[in-house]
Image: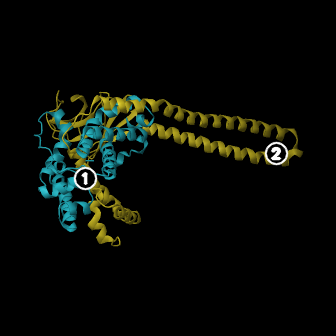
């Protein structure tokens, strides 16, 4: 087998993204890719083209038994998994509270010692050192807990980018959940629409689009509340409609996110 | 949704399954060509989705694309591990007949991606499409395809390259990015 180099990489990249390289050649290709991370984006882009093939087969309906079998596995594992997660959080909480108590006791002890006898200064200083160390540990733990909380909040308030024709032209739009049951569409760099037209948001569930907000792109960032819940929705879309909005979409979506 | 699945929410997973099972099963069926094997593959893939929801990365594509990539990867593993390949010529026939895009909005958003992909594939010369399908759906390596079709390896690689370029050009000519 020839040594992997730029020319060979070029020669094999299409077969690689199609999964059509023999094992040894694939390994060699991936080693080269690991050593040249600047080429990863090109492979990702090509991989996205190949990924489209997955959407092309004629639709087939899976049997209800398949759903039952999958859900049987899921339901059997759900409770133990939740218990494991809760147990992990509980251990962190317990650890933190024990440390907090230890810190409080140590601080009281230090104050008592300071006021009681200066002859114990040397011992006090030693204890202070320990307290500082304990404080440092507690702060570290608190930071870890805060970090975990933040990550959880980020997960809960996730954003969903919208794709589509306008996104391809450079518009940035995403659906952001700012708190429970409050969802907004944040859009920037949108094309302007004529005065007699407006952008209309649709929340789509079970093939039914519901009008869910209007906004007028003006070149600045816009934030528009989405007036229908999206928790059970299948997609969110934006169309250009006559001023005042429409009951039903009258044009194809310019922005779209499948949920 | 996916973060709820990661948090072991079985109801959220059921919703995820209902949204994507048809597409996943369709791909599995296209690869395996047999209902039982396809259901086994789809089950295997969805259990992996359930157990590995934390590994989903939104920046790399939609949830559906991620699920389909799991189906595809496991399907390829299974096809390649079969001692006797039962892949038949009928699996490499041209893709399903192109459906007419619907005027209805609801159909548009749901079917647009699939229709566009089929339309893109229909622009490929049959010899390029056949090679892409042999590789992607049937799991053949380029060397195996070369032997199967009695073509020089260079021709196989060339057709792969041209086929993928043509799909990309299809979307670029419509001023649209390749959907992810």
Most extreme residue toward the front, as rendered? Answer: B84
**What is the display colour for chain A?**
yellow
Residue A85 vs residue A20, the one in the foreground: A20
**Label 1 lies in what chain?**
B
Displayed quadrant of residue A252: top left
Q: In this view, does A167 lie above or below B150?
A: above
- Residue A230 visible? The answer is no
Element type at marker 1? helix
Q: Mark 1 points at which residue?
A: B136
- Residue B64 visible? The answer is yes
- The answer for how far apart the CA atoms under marks 2 and 1 are is 72 Å
Q: Name the residue under label 2.
A: A124
Q: Where is residue B76 in the image (x, y as percent from the top left)?
A: 31, 50
- Tell me what residue is drawn at x 34 percent, y 51 percent: B81
- Tell me what residue is drawn at x 75 percent, y 38 percent: A107
Q: Residue B123 carries which label?
A: none
Look at the image and tell me in which quarter the C terminus of chain A lies. top left
Drawn side of residue A113 relative to residue B104, left or right: right
Residue A119 vs residue B29, the one in the foreground: B29
Displayed quadrant of residue B144: bottom left
The residue carrying pointer 1 sits among few (fewer than 14), some (14 to 19) or many (20 or more) residues within 10 Å by Cα, namely: many
Residue B120 vs residue A161, the one in the foreground: B120
**In the rendered image, what is the letter of the chain coloured cyan?**
B
Residue A162 vs residue B164, the one in the foreground: B164
**Label 2 lies in what chain?**
A
Q: Where is residue B111 in the image (x, y as percent from the top left)?
A: 18, 39
Q: Where is residue A139 in the image (x, y as percent from the top left)?
A: 63, 43
Drawn side of residue A36 relative to residue A249, left or right: right
Drawn side of residue A35 relative to residue B37, left or right: right
């Amino acid at each position: 087998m020839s040594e992997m180099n730029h020319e060979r990489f070029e020669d094999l990249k299409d077969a690689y993204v199609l999964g059509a390289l023999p094992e040894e050649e694939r390994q060699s290709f991936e080693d080269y890719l690991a050593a040249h991370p600047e080429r990863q984006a090109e492979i990702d882009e090509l991989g996205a083209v190949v990924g489209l093939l997955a959407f092309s087969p004629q639709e087939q309906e899976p049997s209800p038994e398949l759903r039952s079998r999958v859900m049987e596995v899921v339901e059997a594992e759900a409770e133990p998994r939740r218990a494991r997660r809760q147990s992990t959080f509980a251990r962190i909480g317990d650890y933190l509270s024990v440390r907090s108590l230890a810190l409080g006791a140590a601080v009281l002890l230090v104050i008592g010692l300071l006021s009681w006898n200066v002859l114990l200064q040397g011992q006090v200083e030693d204890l202070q050192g320990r307290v500082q160390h304990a404080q440092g540990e507690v702060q570290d733990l608190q930071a870890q807990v805060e970090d975990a909380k933040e990550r959880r909040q980020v997960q809960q308030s996730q954003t969903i980018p919208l794709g589509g024709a306008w996104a391809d032209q450079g518009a940035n739009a995403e659906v952001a959940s700012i708190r429970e049951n409050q969802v907004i569409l944040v859009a920037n760099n949108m094309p302007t629409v004529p005065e007699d037209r407006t952008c209309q948001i649709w929340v789509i569930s079970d093939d039914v689009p519901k009008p869910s907000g209007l906004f007028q792109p003006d070149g600045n960032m816009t934030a528009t509340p989405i007036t229908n819940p999206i928790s059970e929705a299948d997609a969110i879309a934006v169309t250009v409609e006559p001023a005042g909005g429409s009951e039903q979409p009258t044009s194809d979506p310019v922005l779209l996110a499948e949920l | 949704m996916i973060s709820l699945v990661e948090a072991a929410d079985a109801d959220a997973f059921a919703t995820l399954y209902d949204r994507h099972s048809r597409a996943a099963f369709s791909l599995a069926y296209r690869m395996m060509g047999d209902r039982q094997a396809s259901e086994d593959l789809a089950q295997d893939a969805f259990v992996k989705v359930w157990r590995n929801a934390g590994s989903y990365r939104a920046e790399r594509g939609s949830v559906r694309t991620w699920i389909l990539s799991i189906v595809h990867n496991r399907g390829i593993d299974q096809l390649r591990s079969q001692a006797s390949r039962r892949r038949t010529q009928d699996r490499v026939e041209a893709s399903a007949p192109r459906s007419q895009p619907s005027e209805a909005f609801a159909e548009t958003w749901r079917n647009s991606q699939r229709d566009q992909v089929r339309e893109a594939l229909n622009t490929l010369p049959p010899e390029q499409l056949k090679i892409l399908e042999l590789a992607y759906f049937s799991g053949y390596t380029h060397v195996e395809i070369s032997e199967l079709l009695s073509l020089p390896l260079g021709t196989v690689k060339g057709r792969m390259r041209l086929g993928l370029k043509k799909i990309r050009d299809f979307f670029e000519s419509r001023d649209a990015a390749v959907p992810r």
